[in-house]
Amino acid sequence: MSPHSESPTPAKQLGVFHVNGETHEVAFAPHHTLLEVLREDLGLTGTTHGCELGECGTCTVLVDGTPVLSCLTLALEVAGGADGDPRPIETIEGLADGPNLHPLQDAFADLGASQCGYCSSGFMLTANALLRDDPAPDRAKIRTALAGNICRCTGYVKIFEAVELAAARLRGEARQPARETLYGS
Amino acid sequence: MLRLPTFRYHRPRTAAEAVRILAESGPKARFVAGGTDLYPNMKRRHQSAEHLISLARVEELRGIDGDGPAGTCTIGAMTTLREIERDPRIGAWYPAFVQAVASVSSPLLRNMGTIGGNLLLDTRCNYYNQTEEWRASIDFCMKERGPICWVAPGSPRCYAVQSSDTVPLLCAIGAEVTLLSPGGERRVAVDDLYRDDGIAYLTKRPDELLTRVHLPASGAWSAAYHKLRRRGSIDFPVLGVGAWVARDGERIADVRVRIGGVGSMPIHATETEAMLRGQPVTEELVRAAAELSFKPARTMDNTDSEVPYRKKMAPIFVRRALSECLGL
Ligand SMILES: Cc1cc2nc3c(=O)[nH]c(=O)nc-3n(C[C@H](O)[C@H](O)[C@H](O)COP(=O)(O)OP(=O)(O)OC[C@H]3O[C@@H](n4cnc5c(N)ncnc54)[C@H](O)[C@@H]3O)c2cc1C
Ligand code: SF4
Ligand code: FES
Ligand code: FES
């Protein structure tokens, strides 16, 4: 097999990343994606890698509050440097408030919406952006918003229920999961 | 990790600067918009770029301007599909366009992908959209590095498939684009932007930057887009029908039907159109005219789904799209 003639790996360059409210100066390879910089340079391995081709959604992070695929985002596009400020990035590591889990994390745990857990960070970040936009989305809207996140374990129903439960709790309602959701009917 | 190959990165601030950098960087330079088509292709090593010219900071390529009914509505090439989907003006003036935009991939990809990138999307094929190792194991095909076509081994050409959702619709409604190069600007119909060749699938020259999409005056016509795919949540179209109808009372004054996902360019359903033009609107006529799209919608076995099924569905989707336009 003859790979494309590829130039030698270029020198790393310095850039500033604004992740979960903290600023990091990182030396990174200019052809690396945000996913690679998060996992390999910043050690933030909560953002998982699946297909790396845009098909599965597990690498979802928020950039400027909008869910995007970190496997298809060039790190250079979000880094700050001489010609601009870094763009704010949110990953799963920033979801909890200190020792207190985010209502989405609680709800995913309570309802078994996270089984192997590989897809969970992507789902929770996409859902978080949705709930900031619309605190009371109906099931159809949740399904549509999460259409780019793929889960091979749960069958999705528990995930939709967890998002609904978290939404209710975020609205200040003291909602508990339905008995049949936890124990079956 | 499936990593990108290395490249030199450029970040122009204006369209003129972007075009100049491309011209100065030689043949192995490419623009990148949202990267949702180009980066997967580069990771699989079937597209490459020694110079990557990012359009992300070219502000003049963003945004929606003008007035639909007045016929001055333009959309900057770097406007994301999400922005189009959420724009109330576009929704009111061009609902069928929003229907097509909203059917592209997934919400996450629409947050990143742009309308310019969608119009210029690389053609697709089961033997091409594979990793380098996969392709090496059966030997490369002629769209990238190899000598032959695996779909039609005796063929001198490539049959990779036009797979963008907005293309059939924008062709059908008569939208146009502006292309900018060092030699100046030109405006072409989206319908004239494509060629029936899976490799050289665009009439746009490599040195041209797509700057704006121009939508026709909204109002006295209706349009529809109907898409067939395996998973409604994310998949590319294996059939995408864009239809446009202008009525004159109970008669069909004019009609255009473009079928995507079946050939290297959007297919013109010429006989279907001819049978309808000037005729009174009836369900029987639409049904009969739609049947005539079976022949031109000749698909190859190089995308998802079975060929006989896709062929059978083409007239059905043409009928549905036309019926929606006509309120049947
Ligand atoms: C899993 C998955 C599913 C998908 N499903 C669909 C689908 O269902 N329907 C669909 O239509 N698409 C689909 N896509 C493809 C893609 O997401 C969209 O077509 C998107 O709109 C491409 O836009 P982009 O800005 O990301 O393009 P890019 O990848 O940035 O660019 C695409 C091509 O156009 C060139 N280019 C981009 N902008 C310009 C410009 N202004 N001037 C000149 N050249 C330019 C680039 O050099 C490149 O060759 C899918 C992609 C993935 C990964
Ligand atoms: S149609 Fe043939 S030449 Fe074209 S990409 Fe497919 S296998 Fe390759
Ligand atoms: S790893 Fe990014 S979409 Fe699958
Ligand atoms: S919990 Fe295993 S993939 Fe979703």
Image (cartoon, grey):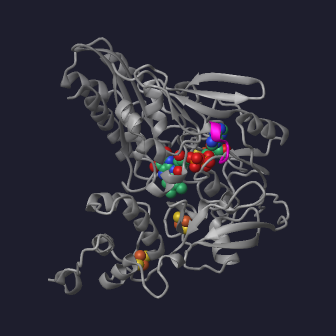
Residue B35: give x, y in percent of width and height. Answer: 62, 52
Q: Nearer the viewer, residue B319 or A123?
A: A123
Bounds of the magenta segment = B56-60
Relative height, residue B225 to residue B302 (above, below): above
- Type of secondary structure dominating the magenta stretch: loop
- Report whether residue A5 is seen: yes
The residue lying furthest to the left in this view is A185
Residue B215: give x, y in percent of width and height. Answer: 48, 27
Q: Is residue B59 magenta?
A: yes
Relative height, residue B209 to residue B234 (above, below): above
Relative height, residue A114 to residue B186 (above, below): below
Q: Quadrant of residue B294?
A: top left
- Report whether residue A153 is seen: no
Q: Is residue B232 magenta?
A: no
Write the residue at 43% across / 85% down: A100
Write the residue at 85% across / 66% down: A11
The C terminus of chain A lies in quadrant: bottom left
Write the residue at 39% across / 80% down: A114
Residue B162: give x, y in percent of width and height. Answer: 52, 40
The N terminus of chain A lies in quadrant: bottom right
Residue B129: give x, y in percent of width and height. Answer: 58, 55
